[in-house]
Amino acid sequence: MAEIQRSCLTASERHDGRILQRISLLAEIKIINIFRQLFILSIDLMIEERIKTMDSCPICRSNKPSLSITCICGYDFEKEEIIDNEKIREYFFKIKSANNWEEEIKLTRRIHEVQQKKYGKTQRGMHGGWKESDTGTLLNIAKSTVNDNIRLAEVTDEYPEIMKNEKKTRAIKQLSNLNKGILSTILRKQFKTEKNLQSYLETNWKKIELFNEWNLKESQKNITGGVIDILAHHKSEPKWLIIELKKDMASDKAVGQIQRYMGWVKENLALKSDEVIGLIISGYPPGENIRLALLNNKNIDQQIYCLENDQIRFMDTETAFDFFNFEKYPIEKQIELLKKKT
């Protein structure tokens, strides 16, 4: 009898234990649901608060609608992006058709920046991000138009005189001429004589990054068939460097000239295992003939020099040609080159 009572008691305890487990599990589920509801509520409150603090649309600058989260231009205040392509195109072409090109370029820039803020900026060599071509697709206009509009909008503070043009095409041309003038001022400053150029290089040899790995050996070295402007030797490797100087644009004749000097050094100064290379330093602009002559010549290089604040700067031939063809490039490329140069 006692054993039967103990068995019933044990069964009863197990039953009560399962009930308690179920009650505990249900309580946990209710707590989780409460926290989930509170989290959703807090997110909704944050969104509402953010929308409340946004008094006007960042695209069209109109007041925020009271009964909708979407602006008349297609901007969504909650998602903080443009969600209605038809509305934004309609609004854009309304501004464009009013022949107010100043507002058109500023609107293009605002649209692009809002979408970039949402999707991130595109980085070179990386996928993703919002590109100018995406803005073109969104507005149903060419990428080049987006480029021009954004570039003009970016420089309105720096060049307010551009905004006085009646037509956008004239403003684009004026900006291109201004950029060209800046570039011309930077690149056209050169030494008056070849002797001045050589003296500067010799005096500042240790300060010039281009010559970091080279020891200056001799200048104006008379040899059979000419004079080597500068002769240098590598600090750690068996290499000789022959430098030919031209204060202005170099012709392809300089290639034959420096090859003759390199042959003389190879035969009279260098060991059999030594490498002899040549460098032509010339002024701007670069020459097309010498560029072609050097394309397949791995032992001779050319650097174009210019003076900025009495400091010499160098650029390779291809970069120099980019600057030489500057006025043929779109504004976006011009500004990119100016940033690269300055």
Image: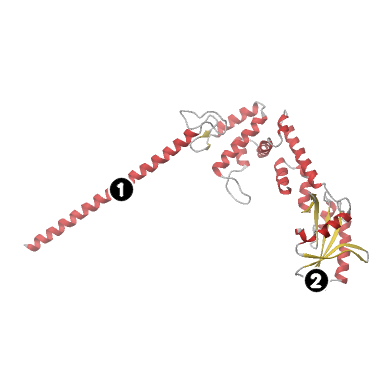
Q: Are marks 1 and 2 in contact (CB under 8 Å)?
A: no
Quarter of the N terminus within the rendering: bottom left
Residues at marks 1 and 2, CA–CA distance in whole angstroms:
81 Å
Q: Quadrant of residue 164?
A: top right
One can see residue 293 in this view: no
Q: Where does label 2 land, which residue? A: 274
Residue at x 59%, y 39% (from the top left corner):
113
Secondary structure under the numbered disc 1 in the rendered image: helix
Q: Is residue 8 above or below residue 186?
A: below
Q: Residues within 10 Å of mark 2 (few under 14, many from 20)?
A: few
Residue at x 27%, y 48% (from the top left corner):
27
Q: Quadrant of residue 151?
A: top right
Secondary structure under the numbered disc 2 in the rendered image: loop
Q: Quadrant of residue 298?
A: bottom right
Percent from the top left, x then y, of residue 195?
89, 56
Of callouts 1 and 2, which one flags the residue occurring earlier in the amino acid sequence? 1
Residue at x 71%, y 33% (from the top left corner):
160
Q: Where does label 1 land, which residue? A: 29
Q: Amino acid at mark 2?
A: Asp
Percent from the top left, x then y, of residue 317?
79, 53
One can see residue 212 in this view: yes
Percent from the top left, x then y, of residue 243?
84, 61
Q: Amino acid at mark 1?
A: Ile
**Looking at the image, which is closer to me, 119 or 141?**
119
